[in-house]
Each structure stands twice: as structure tokens, then as C-alpha cells.
Amino acid sequence: MITCDQITVSYGRTIAAERVTFDVGPGEILGLLGPNGAGKTSVIRALTTILEPTSGSAWIDGCRLTDAPAVRSRIGVLPESSGYPTARSAHEVLRFHGRLFGMDRSAAMDRADELLELVGLHDQRDARVSTFSRGMRQRLGIARALMNRPRALFLDEPTLGLDPAGKQEILTFLREEAIAGGGAVVLCSHLLDEVERVCDRVAIMHEGRVVADGSVAAVVASARVLGGARVDVRPPAVPTTVEAINEVEGMRATCRTGSAGRIDVDFKPNGPAMADLAHELGRRRLDFTALEARGARLSDAFLQLTGATGEVLAS
Amino acid sequence: MTARTTAGWQVVAVQELRDLWRSTKGLSVLFGFTVLLSAMAYAAASEADLNLLDSRESVGLVGQAAIALGALAALVVSADAISGERERGTLESILVTPLSRRDLVIGKLVAASTMWLAAVAVAVPYLATMGRGPGISLDAVLTVCLAGSLAAAALTALGLAISAVSYSNRASLAASVALLILLAAPSQLPAITTRSTLGSILIKANPVAAGMRLTDQVLVKQHSWSSQWTLLLAPAIAAVVLTGLAVRMSRRLELGDSR
């Protein structure tokens, strides 16, 4: 459905994305990940015909990228910092967008009503966008991206500014509705937990290149950070637990400020392992709420592959 | 998908018209135009009543003001057309639709042009009433409509072309207004300067100054239309060339920000 073949995007001498290659099949959601400046938005803009790639080629639903009108009629886009005409109503925004895709007036009205219902904004159909919260605008943006029943959907930070319930709602919606017609979705997000939950595959970008591509499990496995663990304890118990773990030969425990009771444990090479840590915690009667091997999550793979910091992930 | 029944530029123009006239933007610009023109008309009529100004001159003055202010109003609207979308972050969602850049620019051009039409609708009663005394109502209305429409068309296209390449709305507006002032300035040169060959060329080649000069020649100096028609050449050529330029520049329409 989406084939990106060796796409390079440059701004003058600066290369934003280099030889980026990935495929997204029908009904598949690809998470395009990377720290700020990794080149994700440049790739999205190249695939949505906003930018002309310096080299490489791509196909959307069988249409070559160079056939811009054909590509545009097959894609839906929620841009990263999408603005909205605040003086228009939600229904008007969608209707106008539909008309730009060549729908006649009544078809655009019907589709707008259908989508407002789907994203839970039907009660606000005639309200001006200026009265909308950030979350409502994001939902309207997703509805706008779906207006033309796209074969390929590009969503740049779709849950930005949403509360947890709103995020959950949008992700469920994406999973169930956006790909219902067999289209493909490319989802850019900094929130790795949600990517892990909703995406079939991920491509991790770093300094303009794709450094990992595959199923979430495969990417996590390929970048597995061996020799580490994560222990969650109640915040008052952090100093005691860190001290106790550090007394064990071959283990080093650290707790970053503001990590709310999360302790990272490093194991010396050829030294102790998870079982030893669990045994030690039990033997010393140290209470903990969670214990997991570091490297088992997408966020660990991301950190390993991009060298990003926790601050980047949190941004 | 349903087959397209309306051209893309028409869809854009209709939506832009709604945005312009339903919001405070269009109405406030028109209100500003009306206040300024009213003040000019009142001052000119008062001076004519006191015999400080010939009644023909007062009509000419109001006609020139209508052309300059009406063109300014149209320019203000068109200068915001693309750079405003870019600044508000709404341009990208339009550029990813099958709507051609050309249709986008033409639609916006059509909508922005209605600002001049509204300005003319406001100016006509003033010109008709003031022109009744010296018996030049029809000439006053015709001169302002013709010369003003051509000058306004040229400036609307110019504003849109500047807006298409400006990444900031303020820069677009400032550049457009500065150009208008530059174009209107020669009409205020002393008569002795404009009688020279260079002065005459300066006026005739300038769409705004030529339009204002035509108003002066026909309404105040009572020259016939047939002897002054060459003053319409510059506005007509500028309207065609600048509209063509704006449409041509649409091909290079970019989002503006990188990454």
C-alpha cells in the first residue's frame, strides 16, 4: 500500500532523511519513531507530496509519488502542527475539505456528519472551532484526514494534547476504524507505549536513517539491552532498596530524580541476572511493585538504537 | 468518490467569501474604508461649500481617495491570503488535497477582489451625490469604477503574489502597503514635475497613479475620455501581468517551514 524506496530529503546541504526505505501493507499500522530532528516529518512530507524528495521513489496505493494529484486523492494527513480555521464550524471544516477532494455538496455533508459521529463531535457540529479544546481539535483533524476515505493515512502525533482517556479513545478508533477499509497507516509519535499498543510494525529513525524496521517484538529483540532490570518501589523505599541492591556483588542500582520510585539496575557482564535480583529482593524482604528485565520494552530498544535520553522520550 | 461538479477555484472562492464576510475581518476593513472616505467627502464638500475648492475638484478628490483606499482595502485582504494560512498552520492540510495550487490562488484572488467591489458600492453614492452639482455624476462613477477596478485588480494580484512567497503575515502586509504607497506617491507630485516627459512616463506607467490622474483629468480638468484613454493602459496591463504572475507563482507555492 505504501512503499518508500530509498527516499532522501535534503534542505540545501543539510540531509534530513537519507535512503529511507519501508513498506506498509493493507490494514497495517506502521509506527515511525525517532527523536526530534530524526527526519520523520521530512519523510512524511515527502510521502504526502509536500516536499520533493532529493532522490528515491515511493508509491502510494500503486501511484508513483511523482503523480502528485493521484497520490493526494489517496492519502489522508494529520500534520504535526495542524492549524484549524477557527471561525468555521467543525462541520464546515470537514465539508470544505471534502469539496477539495471533489465531493459534491451533499456527499461532503453526509461524510462530515458520519465522521463527526465517529470521532464523538457530532453534538458540536455547528460550534466554531475556536471554542474547541486541544483534544477536540485533534479529533477533528483525524476526521478531516479520513474525509476522502484514504488508502494511506499519515498521522503525525495524533494524540498530542489529549488526556489519557482521549488518547485511548483515539487509539482504539485508529485500530478499529482507520484501517477498517484495508488502508495503511503511518503513525509518528513520541509516546512509545501507545505505538507499542497500536502498531503492527515500527521503523525507528535516527539522524535521518532508518536504524530498525520490523514488528515491535522483532525490533525489541534486535536491540535488546542485556544485563539490566527495572524495579518499581514506593518512593519512600527508594534509598533503602538502592543501598541494598548495591551491596550485592555485580549489581549497580541507580534512581534518577523525578523517576517516582523507579530503580534501574545494571548487571556486570557474566555476573548476576534477573533471577539473582529477584532472589535478593525476596531474601532481604524488600517490597516492590514491579520487576522487569530492561530491554523488554519498545522504549528500551528506542533508547538503545538512538542513544536518546529519557527527556527526549518524555517530550 | 462523487465526480467533481464544481471547479476547485470555485470551492475555494465560496469558502473564502464566507470567511471574509461572515467574520469581522472583511467588515472591519470595509468599515475603516467607509469612515475614511466619509471624512474625505465631508471635508471636500465643506470646502466646496465655502468656495475654497471647486465642486469638480471636490468630486475628483473623493474619486481619487476611493481608488487609493479601495485598492488598499483589497490589498490588505489579499496580502493575508496565503501567508495567513501558512502562519495559522492551515496551509499543509490544503496542499495535501488534489486541489491544484493554481485553483487555490485563483479562488483566493476572486474572494479578495470582492473587497474592492464592496468599496465601490460604498463609494458610488458619495460620487453620485457630490457629482450632481457640477453635473458629472455619471463620469465620476464610471471613472472610479473603471480605473479603480483595474488598479485594484493589479494590487490584489500583487498582494497575493507577495503573500505566496512571504513566510510571515506581517512581512507580507508591510511589503504590500509599502508598494502601494510607492505607487500612489507620483500622483502627489507637483504638476510642473509631471508635465515633463519623465514625469509623464512615471505617471502613465504606474497603475495607481495613472488611475488617479485619469480621475483628475476627466472630472476636474474636463478632458474627454477619448483623449485620456492611454491612462488606462498601465492599470490594464498591470492587472493582466500581475494576475498572471500570481497564478504562475502558485506553481512554486511551498509550505514554508522546513522539518
Image: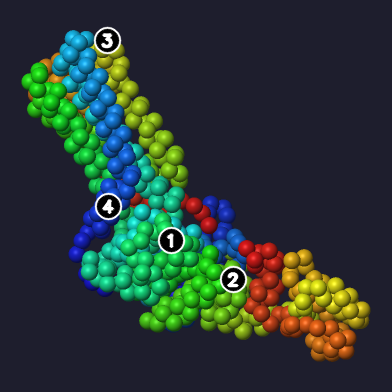
Residue B19: image x %, image y %? 31, 51
Is any part of residue B235 visible from this angle?
no
Q: Mark 2 falls within which chain?
A: A
Q: What residue would you read off at disc 4? A: B18
Three-letter amino acid code at disc 2?
A: Leu
Q: Mark 4 falls within which chain?
A: B
Q: Mark 3 falls within which chain?
A: B
Q: Are marks 4 and 3 on the same chain?
A: yes
Residue A249: image x %, image y %? 91, 81
- Please name whichever residue, A139 or A275, is drawn nearer the observer in this view of the structure: A139
* Camera-nearest label, 3 or 1: 1
Are circles 4 and 3 on residues that touch, CB within 8 Å? no
Q: Is residue B167 above or below residue A54?
A: above
Q: Earlier in the sequence, mark 4 or mark 3?
A: 4
Q: Mark 1 falls within which chain?
A: A
Q: Quadrant of the N terminus of chain B?
A: bottom left
Give the residue drawn at x 74%, y 69%: A259
Residue A263: image x %, image y %? 78, 75
Three-letter amino acid code at disc 3?
A: Ile
Quarter of the rendering containing residue A279 = bottom right
Q: What residue would you read off at disc 1? A: A132
Q: What residue would you read off at disc 2? A: A191
